[in-house]
Image (spheres, rainbow, N blue to C red):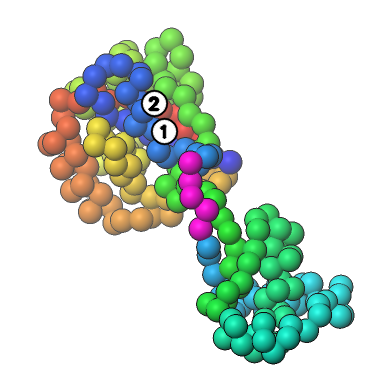
Amino acid sequence: MTHYALMVLTKTQEQDEVHALMKPFDEQREDITPRKIYLDEKEISQMMETYIQFEPVPYVQPTKEEAKELGLSRNKLGDYRFLASKMQDWDGCDGGYDKNGLYKVVKYNEQGYYDYYGIMTESTPQRGYWREAWQGKDCLPLKEVDWNLLDWADSSYLPTQVVTPDGLFHRAENIGWFGSSQEIIKQSEWKQLYAAIKAQHGDCFAWRLDVHI
């Protein structure tokens, strides 16, 4: 559970454009197509060690015909069938198996970077991130944002999360729970990317968002 600051750039001064740009990155989107993720041998072994101790005779051995149809050994098919039935308990989702192995069926947004957010304005400051740099305005052209006005940051400070009007979510680091973060690209590369964003979208309006993940 983490709050972080995000800058969103829009072509207009309308908050509706902010919401439209943010919508694809909602981790709770319901229009995601379910897909298979195959478990590796290490995780399969961990599952088997976890559940076999409670069920010493966990399954009925598949027939030769069933195993042949999938191109698996009878023992392997039996393991997969047993473990697929435990996938809800193991990972909170449905499980299955085919000739390629044991899999879980997941439905989540791989580009889900928030579960909720608030637009920070003078009337609704939320957590107040970057307030000084916005100079008392709800939004302002990116070229007018002055990071040097932040008394807690040094002259090299740049935001690490930016959404641009073309619908791209640019990230210098991956934000995790409890304030954790992991660098995605080097600081020097992010500095170049931010400079390119500013050159291309300098006249676009910059908004401050308090984002929760």
- Residue type at mark 2? His
Q: Residues within 10 Å of mark 2 (few under 14, many from 20)?
A: some
Question: Farthest residue in the front direction?
Answer: 65
Q: Quadrant of residue 105?
A: bottom right
Secondary structure mostly seen in the magenta stretch: loop
Q: Is residue 112 above or below residue 82?
A: above
Q: Residue at x 39, y 16 (%)?
A: 121
For marks 2 and 1, give the CA distance. Answer: 6 Å
Place of residue 206 in the rendered image (x, y in percent of width and height, measured from the top left): 27, 25
Can residue 180 be seen here? The reply is no
The reply to whether the C-beta atoms of the residues labelled 2 and 1 are less than 8 Å apart is yes
Q: Is residue 6 above or below residue 37?
A: above
Place of residue 127 in the rendered image (x, y in percent of width and height, measured from the top left): 48, 24
Q: Which residue has dot 2 on it?
A: 19
- Residue type at mark 1? Lys
Question: Farthest residue in the top direction?
Answer: 123
The magenta segment:
31-35
